[in-house]
Amino acid sequence: MSHLPSTNSDGPTKGPGSHDVDVVVVGAGFAGMYMLHRLRTHGYSVRVFEAGTDVGGTWYWNRYPGARCDVESLEYSYSFDKDLEQDWEWTERYSSQPEILAYAKHVADRFDLRSDIRFETRVEAADFDESSGLWHTRTSDATTTSSRFFVMATGCLSSTTLPDIAGIEEFGGVTVHTGQWPKEGVDLKDKRVAIIGTGSSGVQAIPVIAEQCKDLVVFQRTPQYTIPARNEPLNAARQADVKSRYREFRAANFAMPQALGSEIPKFNDSIHDVPEDERLRRFENAWERGGTLFMSSFNDVLVDESANVYAQDFVREKISEIVQDSQVAAKLTPEHIIGCKRLVIDTDYFETFNRSNVRLIDVSQDPIHQITSSGLATQEDEFEFDVLIFATGFDAMTGSILRVGITGRDGLTIQEKWSAGPRTYLGLTVPGFPNMFAISGPGSPSVLTNMIVSIEQHVEWITDCIAWLDERGASTIEALPEAEEDWVEHVNAKADRTLFPGCNSWYLGANVPGKTRVFMPLLGFPGYVRRCNQVAENDYEGFIVQ
Ligand code: NA7
């Protein structure tokens, strides 16, 4: 238990014992914002801590040029308030970061969220005190807040990673990570720019930066399968049509495996059962339509390696058609399973390598040896530039949870508990950590779905759970070890039936040296929702309630 000074209470609290607020929430992204709103509407007092100066989470930090959502804007939005849904107007098929951040700010204004959010305040530690049954959350402003419940709403892609390259501190120009892009922007005009990394962030940023800067050198370790997004201004008639039947539209998406894309044609046949011309026609239609559901052209592209090869070949052929220099095209051509690293969607990514101011360096052949004061040296060459951009990704799904010193029952820390990889029950709770919840935690569908749909489902489940505890006068809920064991097996079994474990993706933690290789998200949203509902209906089976 912490002995630091306690903050004053923010308002009415419910339930037993004396505490500052009912619920502490970490993070004011889409998850933290809705958690706050939902708990308030149920009469709970809440305090949210947020390291940034405003709401938005992922969309607050990822301000790099070209940052855009890969879920369509009419779907990537809250569904909990009908008036909000009707009032907000999206302008593009896929929203840009500034528009999504503006939406988050609008939601914060509309529901007066900021009054319960403490900005520029980082949560450093949270301890569960067994004698009082309360959580004590210590923050960077040297205060401690007591609460009955503790909710991690820290996002799946919040904890940025930098590669371990010698001399990284030596560079004399501007160094920036795409996931921590400065609010004031970075001046790229007439600058020589280098970017390391060609995941989704790199693929989105490269075409936009190439247009702004003098010269761009792209350091690529693994070539990327990327499908055109076909972003465009949002058709007004389409927006009006969806708004006229938003409930039905949301419900149809809610029933989809990834909680999105109900109006995109799906096929439930094997790629091996269709003739070649039909196979090509479907892939071609998906390529022309744009978007991540390219993989849904057949039912086995992500489960059967020989089926997957057809999709690989299709994209490889496209790359060779688009990229004019055959040597550059060869370097840009991936060989791995398509879709097992997250499929990227782009705007003019491959086309950008036809520009005279863009150069591609394959660091799998010629690794980066050292960063210098004026640029970097690979084993065979030297490069000078003014701006160095790391698009090197995140310690995904667990990074921002493990960065907080969370201590549960019997002094067990979350770092100890997850030393061999994350283990949860329902992706929401962890045995040994009573009254703690993670929104879109490892073991939940999260990053394999439309995140906002997953967030809403989690927030509502958590709120119902807290209200249920209060109705029956209970004070704690804690997952049972055997429920966790079964859940981990279930998540692994689902992944093992697919090709997802077959390459080095951040889904597996493979991008972070030393991180245990575990497939973290759960496949299949509707089955997950059914299970969560069943657990609640059966008086929270798999939990001990006291
Ligand atoms: P990703 O998808 O993890 O991509 C990171 C990129 O950085 C990827 O191309 C990596 O290559 C590359 N990388 C990482 N370390 C190095 C070193 N040391 N040298 C060269 N290249 C390196 O992160 P993003 O930010 O692009 O996207 C994350 C998610 O955000 C995305 O999937 C969307 O959901 C939104 P690698 O492939 O590991 O060889």
Image (cartoon, rainbow, N blue to C red):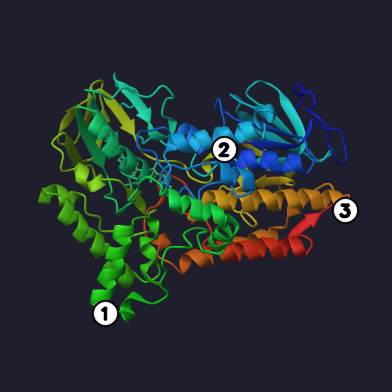
Mark 1–mark 2 distance (CA, rounded to whole Å): 46 Å
Residues marked 1 and 3 touching at CB (< 8 Å): no
Tell whether circle 2 marks a residue whose Cβ is less than 8 angstroms from ligand 1. no
Q: Would residue 300 appear left or right of 474 to someone viewing this image?
A: left
* Quadrant assignment for ligand 1: top left
The residue that appears at 62% across and 39% down in the rendered structure is 32
Nearest to the eye among marks 1 and 3: give it: 1
Q: Quadrant of residue 110?
A: top right
Instruction: Give the label on residue 129, or none.
Output: none
Q: How packed is label 2: few (under 14 Cα within 10 Å), some, or many (20 or more)? A: many
Residue 267, compared with residue 137, is above or below; it is below
Asked if residue 141 is positioned above or below residue 389 in the image, the reply reads above
Residue 256 at least partly seen = yes
- Which residue corresponds to mark 2? 29
Identify the residue at image location x=29%, y=59%. Answer: 288
Q: Earlier in the sequence, mark 1 or mark 2?
A: 2
x, y (%) of residue 2?
75, 28
Q: For residue 486, what is the image quadrant? A: bottom right
**Residue 142 occupies quadrant:** top right
Residue nearest the viewer, comparing 138 with 10: 10
Residue 472 bears which disc, if any?
3
Q: Nearer the viewer, residue 324 or 539?
A: 324
Q: Residue furthest top?
A: 172
Residue 351, compared with residue 403, is above or below; it is: below
